[in-house]
Image: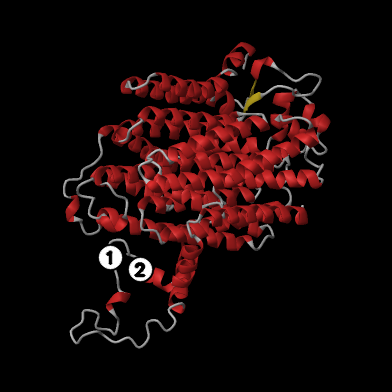
Amino acid sequence: MSYNVYNVYMHFPVLAIMTLFVGAFCVTLAGKHEKVRNVIAGCAVLISFTLLALLVKPVMIDGNIITYWMGNWEPVEGYAIGIAIEVDALSLFFGLLITIAVACSCFYSYQYMKQDDARGSYFTLYLMLSGGVLGIVLSGDLFNIYVMLEVMTFAAVGLTAFRTWNPNAREAAFKYLVVGSIGSTCALLGTALVYAQCHTLNLAQISAILPGNLNPTTILAFALLFAGFGCKSFMFPFHPIAADAHGAAPSSVSVLISGVFTKTGVYGIIRVCYFLFRSMGLTSVQTMLVFIGCLSMFVCVTMALNQHDFKRLLAFHSISQIGYILTSLGLCTALGIAGGLYHAINHTLFKGLLFLTAGSVLYATGTTYLEKLGGLARKMPQTTALFLIGAFSISGIPPFNGFYSKWIIYQATFEKAAGGSIGYALVTVVCVVTSVLTLASFIKVGHSVFFGQANPELGNVKDPPLGMRVPMWILATLCVLTGLFPDLMLRYIIGPATAAVLNSVGYIDAAMGAGYAEAHLADPSLLAAPQLISIGAWQPASWLVLFVIVLLAVFLCSLLSRGNSARGLESDAKHAVFFGGERAEYSHISGGDLFWGFKHNLRGYLGFMSRVHTGVTNDYVLWGVTATAVIIAYCFVTM
């Protein structure tokens, strides 16, 4: 690529960020002129997306890394003194995810938010949040990432509390602010410790100095940054605040919190583990990330199965899917990284779609409580079809996108087990069981909301307006296309992003100059080039057998856990419907309780989980502080 062409492209990332922030300012100036506000917000998100889309060829396909120094403050004598915007395939990958979700949610908001007051403030906060998130993934400066993290967090808190008439919204925003401050504090302290050791905040230069120079200060910095970004991804045990936030925030905001906000945490963990400290070669770090990922996916999917509110159920599922991503990234293999990144884009698409369908149900009926809904399939056929696409995608049903990314994750964990780490076979089983429970949970939602007995009070509901349906159909189409054409995704999107994760040397040299990495790194060697073969030795028949085994295991566990609860029960009357000795209360198939029997058998575990999720802010703060302390202690013992 010629210098003149490159010189044009290098301005696109900073323009994409500034367009969103300037848009937020202009929306405020527009005052009460709703159409003007909508045009400004729509143009801002479209321009931002277009600028990043134009970088696909030079960055994703041609393999260039774009570096832009703010104020033209380039490195002096091999030392970075300015703030850099650096875009490689990984940064662009997350940037595209963000701008797609932001654009769809923005256009959905035009009609969805008409029932609310202060819509000007809504779009101001909305664009501030979008600009902060995009600034995080495109920034090449650690402190600038922290600043953008705070912009994003406070905008998200404001949007969570936007419907101030709802006391639950104010409570959720307060929890979000208090518990989120743990993550922000950890990120700031970790950044300060890194600066004290390296005397620079540039990611590329830090990545050249830190690896191989572990000491108590850098270990503490790593643990704090990991916990800080983990909090922003809502990984276990920081997950409870996500359910409250999603339940109270407008559905268009839930799309950002689920599909965009959490990705900044994932992106930060990748940069910390694979770039700044290059610690993923340590078995202890791999184990920690995989263990947290497995806990996140299993605990949250079981919590989702026990929910009675559509949006809270989706919130727990969102964190469960983040668990898949963290687990796959923790494998530290090319296939594992590819599976995690593939699932990251899929998660943004299908979870965004599901939250928008939940918003459509709320818009039409005024409630998301499962027991108050039912029979909406005939009245809202398009919303039902869109929900099914999202449900099939998140459950890993072929040919939708969730199937292929989960397939890669399954294979990556099996290959890790075949390579000598036998315990990873259990990780595969956890992933499959989680997928089965996810499908069960969405069968429950489908029955409760769309296919169950109709609620006579909802006789006049209908599909939402066209302005809300079009963004949902865009996301649904992408869910199908990214599942039907996985080879194209791996070749042009996932493959380059995976290679970027493994290419620290290229990232360093793009910012600091050719040869800088080789001169400063103790070991500049790279991991093996990614070989993204998605099936390999594992044939579909093997996966079918695995699913059958897991289902049998779940069935047997359910039988064994029945204990004495079903013994000696007699029918209540001579002509009772349940004539086999059962009591009627053990056979509930009501709209919101399709899996009542399954939950009854697991009532000990589910009861314990319900009790510990108290909803008390102090308890969740204690969880976060304890988790941070455990992560710090673990890192000091094992690294």
Q: Position of residue 610 (x, y in %)?
A: 46, 63
Q: Secondary structure at mark 1?
A: loop
Q: Position of residue 69 (x, y in %)?
A: 66, 19
Q: CA distance from mark 2 to mark 1?
A: 9 Å
| Residue pictured at 25% horizontal, 43% vertical | 364
- Seen from the viewer's position, the closer of residues 488 and 600 is 600
Q: Position of residue 120 (x, y in %)?
A: 38, 27
Name the amino acid, label 1.
Ser
Q: Is residue 340 visible?
A: no
Name the amino acid, label 2.
Trp
Residues at circles 2 and 1 in contact by the CB criterion of under 8 Å: yes
Tag count in the figure?
A: 2
| Residue pictured at 39% horizontal, 69% vertical | 598
Tag 2 residue: 596
Left or right: 487 as drawn, with respect to 474: right
* Up/down of 275 relative to 623, above or below: above
Q: Position of residue 392 (x, y in %)?
A: 38, 51
Graded by Cα atoms within 10 Å as few (under 14), some (14 to 19) or many (20 or more), the crowding at tag 2 reads some
Q: Quadrant of residue 204?
A: top right
- Seen from the viewer's position, the closer of residues 624 and 208 is 624
For residue 590, the mark is 1
Graded by Cα atoms within 10 Å as few (under 14), some (14 to 19) or many (20 or more), the crowding at tag 1 reads some
* Up/down of 565 relative to 367, above or below: below
